Amino acid sequence: MKIRKMTATFGGLHHAVLSPGEGLTVITAPNETGKSTWAAFLKAMFYGVDTKERDKVGYLADKNRYQPWDGAPMQGEIRLDWEGRDITIRRTSNRSGPMQQFEALYTASGDPVPGLTGANVGQTLLGVGKDVFVRSALVGQNSTAVTAAPELERRIAALATSGEEDVSASATQRTLKDWRNRRRSNRANGLIPELEDALRSTKGTLAELDSARLRRDEAASRLAALEEEKKDLKFELELHRRQAAKALNRRTAEAQMQLAEAEEQLSALPAPDPVFAGMTREQAKALEASRREQADALRQKAEQADAYAALSRRRHDRQALAKVLIPVLGVLGLALTAGGILSHLFALSAMGILCLIAAAAAAVILPRQVRALDGQMDAILRARESFVPPEIPDADSYLTYLSRREALEQEVRHCRERFEDLLAQGGHIYDTLELLPNPKRPLRETEQALAEVEAERLRWQSVLDRAIGSLNADPLELEVRAGELADQLARRSEEYDALDIALTVLDEANAALRERFSPALNREAAVIFSRLTGGKYHTLTLSRDFSATAGDDDPHSSLYLSAGAVDQLYLSVRLALCRLTAPDAPILLDDALCTFDDHRMALALEALKDMGRERQILLFSCHEREAAWAKAHGVDTIRL
């Protein structure tokens, strides 16, 4: 399988295009230009994006980490050769999540490729699952070391056995542990602890049957005594109630009598002066003041002697004026009028006419004024003769009446409220003549004692019910059940011991297998490691957890190697894994040579160039030295 062209909208890549060569292609770019993003994109295109993965402290899930920076939906396309056909695979985002919509088409015709789905495209095209791919062909930045996985373990184990990949030691061990944990995972969980609890419970029930009869008899006796005590306390409580009712009736009758007396006093209150009927205090005071003002005004009118004399003088003056003024104006007017006519002096005639008009007006006005003055003088005389001082009501007595009435009305309201309240409490206006004995204790103590007796009765009733319930169990049935539980417990314990022995044997076999773990992988990795180190190391041994030792005469752990040598060792392991387990998968290396010195970098590139004759290899680097070597040796280079 060969990749011809990749187009990605993924993380910082926006419709970015990458077209690698046939074999080894060296791709150089500075940091933060998308090299690692292309590696993650290739994995997402073949195996999808895990939508169930969640962010953690210091880690972002791929679905969030590689969301396009420009807000566009996550999507991509790869054009590739597979089984001699040119096909195109696409992934786009939909409601299910990023990169969840998948299609695979023949590039020329656009027809769907049968059998290729989003779930199986990586396994089908590359020949391996995701766990094997990321642990062999996909060498990420600072992650050269190989970690174990059941799928990878099965693939490697098949190299030295029959070729079957459906089992692995770790998977078998996990299955056996699951079976053992199902029987007992700890002291409290599992089938064995459940059976032990059930057996203890059954035996406990049998033991309680004997004591249940004693508890039943004791509870029944105690309940009978408590019922008698409860009956006495209820009678005493009834005495308290009847005495309280008797006292309430007495207070109700007294309240009715007080109400009747208050109403009688209110009705017997003398009526006030009718002139104040319905008036308030302010209105009554205002009426008294008004009457006093009227009396003062009448008294002043009756005593107007000076006013009468003044009116008499004015009347005499008007009469004298009328006797003189009217004849003078009349004669003068006639003379002026006649003289003007005779002398043809019309202005003089006009003056005469005015005098005549004035005489006529005086003849009308002056007598009228005299008559008006006569009326005023007559009114003064009549007021003197008929003056009777008006009656002034006593507002103080009315105010005293109001205060008394309000006090009586308030008393009536208070008595009525108290009477109605007592009636609402259940009081009656009659009293009984019943003679009641005095209770032994106060009401509060009686109620408290009754509550304590009732609580004690309920407790013993519960004891009795439980005892009766225990006695309803069949002892024979319980003994049979205990025997069955004991048999099941013995069987499960035997199974647990057998599983324990199986796990021990499996551990011993697995330890023995580690000593000869996949000779083919060890040989292939050792050849590549020797080439990468210029022949310094000729042997390499891997254990089942992928820890490694290297060296000929004095093999020692990879922990003693330098960082560059460790990266060269595990790169050798990965390249060997690719050759043995994933021959169809392209290899993608992300800054995998950054810790190599120049010499070993050249050795590694030479080895990768030779492997590029068999498969496609993409080497990303942030350094120029890989690109310079590639250019000098005719290897395809791309600058991003």
Image: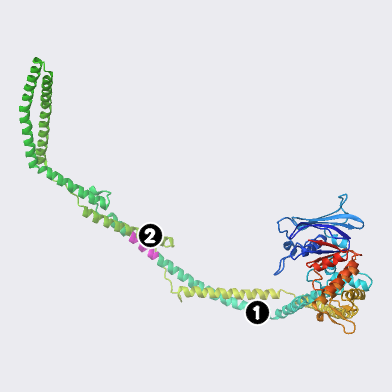
Q: Left of 436 or right of it: where is 47?
A: right
Query: As shown in the figure, which amino acid type bears the numbered disc 2?
Result: Glu
- Residue 633 in the image: x percent, y percent? 88, 66
Q: Earlier in the sequence, mark 2 or mark 1?
A: 1
Q: Which residue is mark 1?
A: 215
Residue at horizontal 11 percent and vertical 22 percent from the top: 351
Badge 1 marks a residue whose secondary structure is: helix
Residue at horizontal 43 percent and vertical 60 percent from the top: 424
On screen, residue 315 above or below 238: above
- Residue 42 in the image: x percent, y percent? 81, 62
Residue at horizontal 46 percent and vertical 76 percent from the top: 441
Q: Main secondary structure of the magenta part?
A: helix
Q: Left of 550 or right of it: where is 277?
A: left
Residue 432 seen? no
In magenta, the rendered stretch is 249-259
Along the line of sight, which residue is nearer the eye, 587 or 422?
Answer: 587
Q: Left of 505 or right of it: where is 98?
A: left
